[in-house]
Image (spheres, coloured by chain):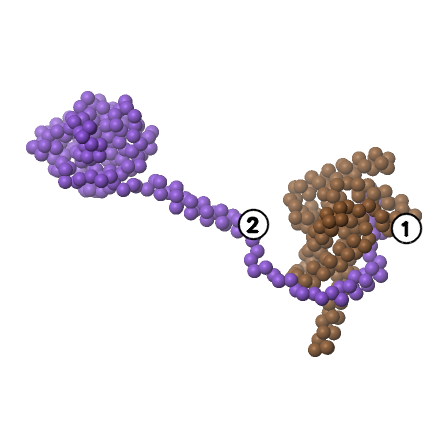
Chain colours: A brown, B purple
Amino acid sequence: MAYNRCMALSVRELHVRRILNTYGDSLYRLAFSYLHNDADAQEIVQDTILQLLRYDPDFHGDGMKEKGWLMKTAANLSRNRLRSLNARDETELDETFAGSEEKDLKFVWNAVNQLPEKYREVIHLFYQEGYSTKEIADILGRKEGSVRSDLSRGRDALRTVLKEVYDFE
Amino acid sequence: MTLNKYQKANEFIRLSEDQKESIVANLLKEEITPARKPLFVFRPWMAGLTAAFAVLILYFGVFHRTGAPMPAPAMNETTYAPQESLAAGGDSASALSDEAPAAEPETFAAAEPANTKIKEEHPSEILTGGYRESASGTTADAASQTIRILSGQEAEAFDAQSYGEKRETVILDTEVSVYGNRAAVFSANGEPMAVICEKQMSEEEMDGLIRDVIRDLGN
C-alpha cells in the first residue's frame, strides 16, 4: 500500500515537472500579462496544473491540444483573478526586468499593458505564443472574426501608445 | 519590430527554478480529488435539434390541423333530393318536388361525362368546398367548411338545410350547373351562390372559379 502511494506520488511529480518544464513559462507569461504580478502569476500556473490533475483530460498524445487546454484554463483563471483583484499595478515589473537590456525593453511591455485587456490577450497569444487567430479564438472562447479585428485594433492602439508616450516608430 | 521587442521582453518573464520547485512542492502536497465528469453536456447542435423538433411538433400539431377538413355540419340527409333527378338534369324546384325532371340541357351540364365521372368516383364523399352568399354580398369564408355534397341538387338541399328558412325561397329558385369536377349553384337571376368543388380553395381560387362558371354560363 505504502509502495503504491509512493509510486503514485512519483508519477504525479513526474507529470507536474513535465508540464512545468514544457509549458510553465508560457503559462506564467500569459498569467503575468493579465495580472502584472509575480506571485499571482505563479499561483495561476499552480492552479492551472491543479485543474489538469483534477480533470485529467485525454489529449490522445497531442501536445498542441494539451497546451491549448492549459492556456485556455490559465486565461480563464487569470481573468477571474483579475476581476476579483481589480487590476494591480506593475509592481513586480522592475524586479522582472533587472538587467540593462531588459530595462530597455520594459517600455514595450508597458505599452502593451496599457492596452485594454481584450487587445492585450490577443497580442500576447499571437505574437508571443505564436497561435493562429483560430486557435486564439478557441482558447479565449471568442469568434475568430472578433479576434482578428481585436488584433488589428490592438496593433493600431499599440502604435498610437508608442508614438504618443515613447515617441517610438 | 516593436512586437519582436515584445517577444524579446517576454523572454525575461519566466519561472525561476525556485518558483518551479515551489509549485511542484505545493502540488504534491495538494490532496487532489478527481473532478466528476458531468453526465450530460449540452452541445450547440442539441439546440438545433430541439428547435427542429419544436418546429415539426408545431407544424403537425397546430398549423397542419387548420388545413384538415372540419366535420360536416349537421344535416338531415333524408331531405336531399334523389340523385337520379340530378343526373337527368332539370331545375332545382322540380328536383326538390320529386317530379319527373324536365330536360334542360342548355343550362345543366349533367349529361356531360364529367358529371357522371364525379358521381362514380365520389358517390357520397365528404368534399370541401366554398360557399358564397351572393355575388355582390359579403363572402363567407367557407373554405374551411366541409360539405357533403356532390351534385348540384345536393348542394341546393345542403344550402337550404344549413342556412335555414330565410334562404329557402331563394334556394328553391336556383339553378344547378355541373362543370367538370365542380358544381355551381345559381340564383334565379344568374348570380352564383355556391360553388362546390373537390378541394379546399382559397378566396382567390373561389373568385376565379366563379368567374369561370359565369363565363361558361354566358357561353
Discs 2, 1 touching: Cβ within 8 Å: no
Quarter-of-image position of residue B140: top left
Q: Which SS class for mark 2?
A: helix
Name the foreground residue: A157 vs A148.
A157
The residue shown at (42%, 45%) is B58
Drawn side of residue A124 relative to residue B168, left or right: right
Quarter-of-image position of residue B24: bottom right
Q: Position of residue B115 (x, y in %)?
A: 19, 35
Answer yes or no: is residue B216 visible.
Answer: no
Quarter of the image containing the C terminus of chain B? top left
Q: Is residue A114 above or below residue A58?
A: above
Q: Position of residue B44 (x, y in %)?
A: 56, 50
Q: Position of residue A149 (x, y in %)?
A: 69, 39
What is the crowding at mark 1: few (fewer than 14 residues within 10 Å), some, or many (at least 20)?
few
The residue to which callout 1 is attached is A98
What is the crowding at mark 2: few (fewer than 14 residues within 10 Å), some, or many (at least 20)?
few
Q: Are marks 2 and 1 on the same chain?
A: no
Name the foreground residue: B33 vs A26.
B33
The residue shown at (82%, 63%) is B21
The residue to which callout 2 is attached is B44
| Mark 2: amino acid | Pro
Quarter-of-image position of residue B86: top left
| Mark 1: amino acid | Ala
Drawn side of residue B56 relative to residue B32, left or right: left
The residue shown at (17%, 40%) is B77
Drawn side of residue B110 relative to residue B27, left or right: left
The chain holding disc 1 is A
The chain holding disc 2 is B
Q: Which SS class for mark 1?
A: loop
Name the foreground residue: B33 vs A11.
B33
The residue shown at (85%, 48%) is A91
